[in-house]
Amino acid sequence: MTNPNPQPGSPDKEPASEEQAAQNALGNTERAEAATTPTAPQERPTLGRLFLENLWAANTFTVTLLSLVLAMVVGAILMIISDPDVLATYAYFTSRPSDAINASWTLVSEAYGNLFKGAVFDPAAANFNTALSPISETLTYTAPLVFTGLSVALAFRGGLFNIGAQGQATMGVILAALAGFLLPLPPGLHLLVAVLAGAVGGAIWGFIPGILKARAGAHEVINTIMLNYIAVYFLTWLIVQNGVQDPNRTDAISRPVDASAQLPRLFGDNLRAHAGILLAVLATWAVAWLLNRSTLGFELRAVGANPDAARTAGISVTRAYVLIMVIAGVLAGLGGSQMVLGTTAAALTPLVVAQIGFDGILVALLGRVKPWGVALAALLFGALQAGGNRMQSYSGISLELVTVLQALIVIFIAAPALVKAIFQLRAARAARLQTSLAKGW
């Protein structure tokens, strides 16, 4: 017979009891309440927590800072092993280790202390001018390096390797000096003409490898290296010509640049820092705007990323290559002009440009070919150069050690995997997409 009051449940299973039905009903009620209850928003991490989480990550800031630490550690080791008196204390290290440790600490701390005092600030300064002298020297060395670093960095962003910043700076200093002592112009106008002449000299020396690359496919590295030699030997020949050489001297030196063509000094006549550092900051801003905000900068970066794709998109690669090298030449020429219009020298000599063009390559690499990064890298190199002079005078450390420190910094920054492995850095978060690559003005 069929049960007139069937129990609820599956026909394939035994009917559910009243207790089971009650439990199921209670569970359904709890799940419904949980579904309808609003979820509390997740707490956003604080700024301090984010800083601590990313402090030991392999990001650009951390790698750069630790690269400086590693370079200073290696530099300290080189100081110790190159000092015979300190090294002699390690002969009896096992019997009296305190002698070696104290001698090493004294040597290294005094050397780096003098490096800081010569580059940033001397607490024992007797007067205002003496206190400002270290930063004045740092800014003096920094200004031309900003220009040559920007020159190399801009070419990098456009897909070219500008080894010719040295030659472009040399042509810039030649034309700037000639305009400085050959043209009888009033103050103000004379300085403007001399600065523009330096820019034109660099532009000409940048145009040559640019047009050869664009029209003939000639590699810019070979061309710029050869043009470096041509510029240097042209300078050497020009100095001893009549009308250029100082008539009161028998050695290879030109007539001095007129005072009306000199860049004004920032902190008075007793300190060397001049207005060139202000021009360097302005140039950094201009290059950053050009690359990140202008249509021309977008085209230059597109050509540097993929010239074939840029050509397909309607961008003239030939025009881009020429413009890249011309603008890079202008920047390097401005850097060179400061070597004779500023306070480094007042006349042309065979070594007036020093190594600012080649140092500009290191500055560009250290600044990761970004304009403001290049400016900060140039400031670091300028500080090392200014502080190195005091370190050599007061601590007896060779100035060449500063060059070693510069090279070590670049080596460690160029090998972030090595720094990450040494300090066991964890991987940094993926960087956000650069939307600026897809837009221009």
Image (cartoon, grey):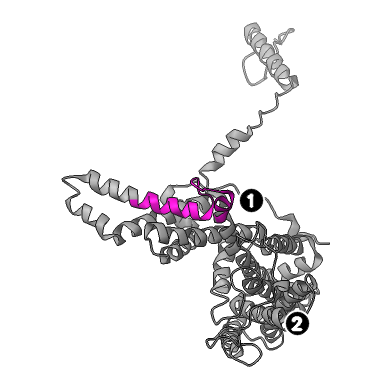
Q: Position of residue 259 (x, y in %)?
A: 70, 72
User: To which residue does mark 1 refer?
Assistant: 431
Question: Is residue 243 visible in this depiction of the protein?
Answer: yes
Residue 124 shown in magenta: yes
Which quarter of the rendered picture does the N terminus lie within? Answer: top right
Residue 53 shown in magenta: no
Mark 1 and mark 2: Cα distance apart in space: 53 Å
Taking 233 as reference, is 369 above or below it?
above
Toward the bottom, the furthest residue is 242
Q: Position of residue 53 (x, y in %)?
A: 55, 38
Which quarter of the rendered picture does the C terminus lie within? Answer: bottom right
Taking 145 as reference, is 101 above or below it?
above
Q: Position of residue 196 (x, y in %)?
A: 75, 75
Q: Which residue type does callout 2 highlight?
A: Leu
Q: Between residue 350 and residue 220, name the one nearer to us.
A: 350
Residue name at image x 81 percent, y 74 percent: 314
Q: Which residue type does callout 1 highlight?
A: Ala
Taking 47 as reference, is 436 above or below it?
below
Q: Is residue 207 left or right of residue 221?
A: right
Q: Position of residue 390 (x, y in %)?
A: 45, 58
Residue name at image x 42 percent, y 67 percent: 400
Question: Is residue 308 visible in this depiction of the protein?
Answer: no
Residue name at image x 65 percent, y 6 percent: 18
User: To which residue does mark 2 refer?
Assistant: 183
Residues packed near mark 2 inside 10 Å, few (<14), some (14 to 19) or many (20 plus): some
Q: Find numbered disc 1 in the image and state the secondary structure of the residue it sits on.
A: loop
* Secondary structure mainly formed by the magenta segment: helix
Q: Is residue 232 left or right of residue 258?
A: left
